[in-house]
Amino acid sequence: MITVKSLHHTFSIGKKGHERKVEVLKGINFHIQTGEIVAIVGKSGSGKSTLLQTIAGFMKPDSGSILVNNTEIAGFTEKQSAAFRLDHFGFIFQNFQLLPSQTVFENIELPLKLKGVSRAIREKKVAELLKKVGLTSVADHYPNELSGGQQQRVSIARAMITNPPIILADEPTGSLDSQTEQEILSLIRLLNKNENLTFVIITHDEEVASIADRQFRMTDGVLVGGMLHVI
Ligand code: ADP
Ligand code: MG
């Protein structure tokens, strides 16, 4: 599903003329199979988000290969990345990133609108997903009327609305209390099982990582591990 080879990225930070180079991805290699939950675990600043951003095509790596379903995406233009992203990746973020002025329904249907899908099909798809994440009763509510756990369910539904095979999650439970965290992790496990959805979860939290089938460890721009984890 995803094969990453020799991925390198260096940031230039500081004022012009006084830049400092920080090598954040130092030759990353890994492979993720369809239907896996993989955790990429590491301390803050180890390069996890940078790795996810390059896989998602939001950021261009300096060099290396990223194959998704046998398509090389590392050299894509911004426009190609945006189109590829809509069909292949859903995103879940720590801070949910919902639009505050839009209802739950409107937040979830947005990716379908971007794809030009008709209103009738959008309504049907959103209703299906609201059911799957257990939010049917709050479809007309606004994000600030929901708990953190409910908001993250909305963002999971939004991530799934275009039927992407892969969900990329950056610290998906980082803003939640531990009970709500467990509920969201259970939902991720359920969706993985029922929908054969592949999840890549980035986290600094060992408890979150423990729900994964396999764990990779990111330390200072290097990724190690990936042994099968039996739950
Ligand atoms: P993590 O997600 O593991 O906390 P990040 O990938 O966010 O790590 O960051 C890794 C390193 O890269 C950090 O030292 C961070 O300061 C640096 N970094 C991240 N994004 C940028 C950027 N856009 N410009 C410059 N440096 C960056
Ligand atoms: Mg991060």
Image (cartoon, helix red, strand yellow):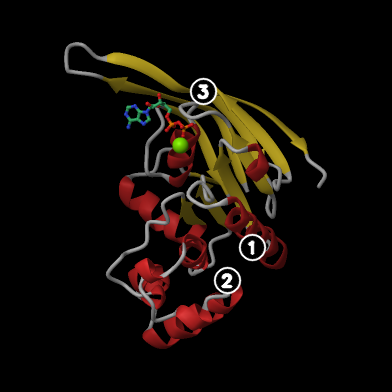
In 3D space, how far apart are the residues under numbered discs 3 and 1 (Cα atoms)? 30 Å
Q: Which residue is mark 3?
A: 221
Asked whether the residues under the numbered discs 2 and 3 touch, taking CB atoms below 8 Å apart as contact, a structural biologist would say no
Q: Is residue 219 above or below residue 136?
A: above
- Residue drawn 49% across the image and 69% down it: 161
Asked whether the residues under the numbered discs 2 and 1 touch, taking CB atoms below 8 Å apart as contact, a structural biologist would say yes
Outermost residue toward the bottom?
A: 120
Q: Is mark 1 within 8 Å of ligand 2?
A: no
Query: Which element type, helix, strand or loop, lies under badge 1?
Result: helix
Q: Which residue is mark 2?
A: 133
Residue type at mark 3: give it.
Answer: Gly
Q: Closer to the camera, 49 or 78?
A: 49
The image position of residue 200, as x and y in percent, is 59, 47
Q: Would you call the spot at circle 3 few (<14 residues within 10 Å), some (14-19), or many (20 or more)?
A: many
Q: Which comes sooner in the sequence, label 2 or label 1? A: 2
Q: Which mark is residue 187?
A: 1
Q: Is residue 217 above or below residue 21?
A: below
